[in-house]
Image (cartoon, helix red, strand yellow):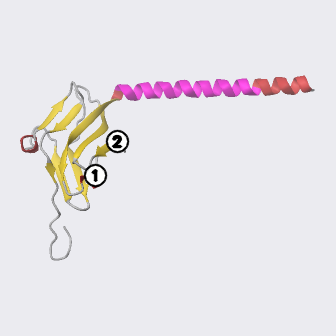
């Protein structure tokens, strides 16, 4: 009876191991497929604010670091298009103390490229904002709304 029970335990463990191995291979393939679809890019620049480290960049996934000097770096994953990466059309910076700034990244129509010294390097997978980003407070109307 003991040998029979031991054989059943070993068979059950072997089946569980096969199942876990198959799931692992499936996850590896899914991960590989995602690496083909997405590329890791970096956004860098500087924020001019009284407390820059309290600024939130609305493209990040917990991969943004903003120092007390205002220098920042953020990693994002951009989906590859048919012939190009899909660059976000805007970046939104918000700080409860100093306000907000939306930067237009539309390469065809935006004046922000010149205003902020923005460069996009497809070789380095980097969006670089060369000039400090000054945040501004929202203007409130008589009803108290922006």
Q: Residue at x 72, y 23 (%)?
A: 14
Determine the residue located farthest toward the front in the rendered image. 69
Where the N terminus falls, by quadrant? top right
Determine the residue located farthest toward the right in the rendered image. 1
Magenta region, main secondary structure: helix
Could you say where residue 61 lies in the image, as x and y percent from the top left?
Answer: 36, 44
Disc 2 packing (10 Å; few <14; some 14–19; many ≥20): few
The residue under label 2 is 63
Where the C terminus falls, by quadrant? bottom left
Circle 1/circle 2 CB separation < 8 Å: no
Q: Residue at x 10, y 39 (%)?
A: 117
Q: Is residue 128 left or right of residue 11?
A: left
**Does residue 82 lie above or below 107 as drawn?**
above
Q: Residue at x 51, y 29 (%)?
A: 27
Label 2 sits on a secondary structure element that is: loop
Could you say where residue 59 lies in the image, as x and y percent from the top left?
Answer: 29, 45
The magenta stretch spans which residues? 12-36
Q: Nearer the viewer, mark 1 or mark 2?
A: 1
Label 1 sits on a secondary structure element that is: helix
The foreground one among 80 and 94 is 94
Disc 1 packing (10 Å; few <14; some 14–19; many ≥20): some
Any magenta on residue 120? no
**Does residue 57 lie above or below 11 as drawn?**
below
Q: Is residue 31 left or right of residue 65?
A: right
The residue under label 1 is 53
Residue 141: which quarter of the image? bottom left
Could you say where residue 24 lies in the image, as x and y percent from the top left?
Answer: 56, 27
Q: Residue at x 21, y 48 (%)?
A: 70
Q: CA distance from mark 1 to mark 2?
A: 14 Å
Q: Is residue 17 left or right of residue 26?
A: right
Name the disc covering residue 17, or none: none
Could you say where residue 139 lies in the image, as x and y percent from the top left?
Answer: 14, 67
């Amino acid at each position: 009876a003991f040998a029979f029970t031991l054989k059943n335990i070993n068979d059950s463990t072997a089946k569980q191991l096969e199942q876990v191995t198959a799931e692992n291979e499936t996850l590896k393939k899914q991960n590989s497929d995602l690496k083909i679809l997405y590329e890791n890019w970096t956004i860098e620049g500087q924020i001019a604010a009284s407390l820059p480290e309290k600024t939130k960049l609305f493209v990040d996934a917990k991969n943004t670091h903003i120092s007390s000097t205002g220098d920042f770096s953020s990693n994002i994953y951009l989906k590859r298009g048919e012939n190009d990466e899909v660059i976000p059309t805007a970046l939104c910076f918000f700080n409860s103390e100093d306000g907000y700034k939306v930067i237009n990244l539309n390469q065809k129509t935006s004046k922000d490229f010149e205003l902020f010294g923005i460069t996009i390097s497809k070789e380095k997978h980097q969006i670089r904002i060369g000039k400090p980003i000054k945040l501004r407070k929202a203007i409130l109307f008589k009803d108290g709304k922006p």
